[in-house]
Amino acid sequence: MLRVTFISSVGTARTVEGDVGQSVMEVARRNGVEGIVAECGGSCACATCHVYVDADWVDVVGAPPADETDMLDFVFDRRPESRLSCQIRLLPALDGLIVHMPDRQN
Ligand code: FES
């Protein structure tokens, strides 16, 4: 199991566990983490799974591919560390990943 910590916009941290191959969005939804709407179910078509990757993890997670970058144009308060959580697949190197939730989704 791999750990992912979600930090709310008011600073409340919640650490949950997921499996290799799951997306960060799936881990959030299966554990009832608030703030990830994921209207499209993970097909990179809604931008309601927006998160900010913690500064210590940006290089590990990497940059978004072109289709995700296009969809990120639709999120509220986009930042350099913005990612769509449905497009981040858990790998062993991401054990301990920290993401921050936006104030609101679209
Ligand atoms: Fe729709 Fe991520 S769940 S873009």
Image: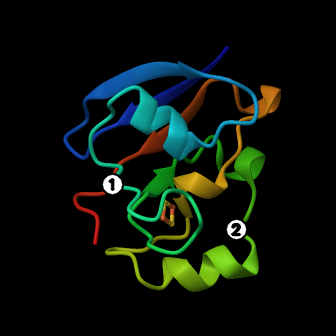
Q: Amino acid at mark 2?
A: Pro
Q: Residue at x 59, y 65 (%)?
A: 43
In this orientation, which residue lies closer to the viewer: 90 or 6?
A: 90
Neighbour tally class for label 2: few under 14, some 14-19, many 20 plus, Cα within 10 Å: some
- Look at the picture and state if 74 lies above or below 12: below
In this orientation, which residue lies closer to the viewer: 85 or 44?
A: 44
Q: Amino acid at mark 1?
A: Val
- Look at the picture and state if 88 lies above or below 2: below
User: Cβ of disc 1 within 8 Å of ligand 1?
Assistant: yes
Q: Which mark is residue 64?
A: 2
- Look at the picture and state if 64 lies above or below 21: below
Give the Cα distance between marks 1 and 2.
20 Å
Which element carries disc 1, helix, strand or loop?
loop
Instruction: Spot the residue most to the top.
Output: 1
The quarter of the picture where residue 60 lies is top right
Q: Residue at x 52, y 33 (%)?
A: 27
Q: Which mark is residue 12?
A: none
Identify the image quadrant of the C terminus: bottom left
- Count of marks, rendered view: 2
Q: Position of residue 100 (x, y in %)?
A: 40, 45
Q: Residue at x 35, y 36 (%)?
A: 7
Image side of residue 42 versus residue 63, left or right: left
Give the residue at mark 1: 37
Image side of residue 6 versus residue 87, left or right: left
Q: Position of residue 51 (x, y in %)?
A: 45, 54
Q: Position of residue 104 (x, y in %)?
A: 23, 61
Image side of residue 29 versus residue 34, left or right: right
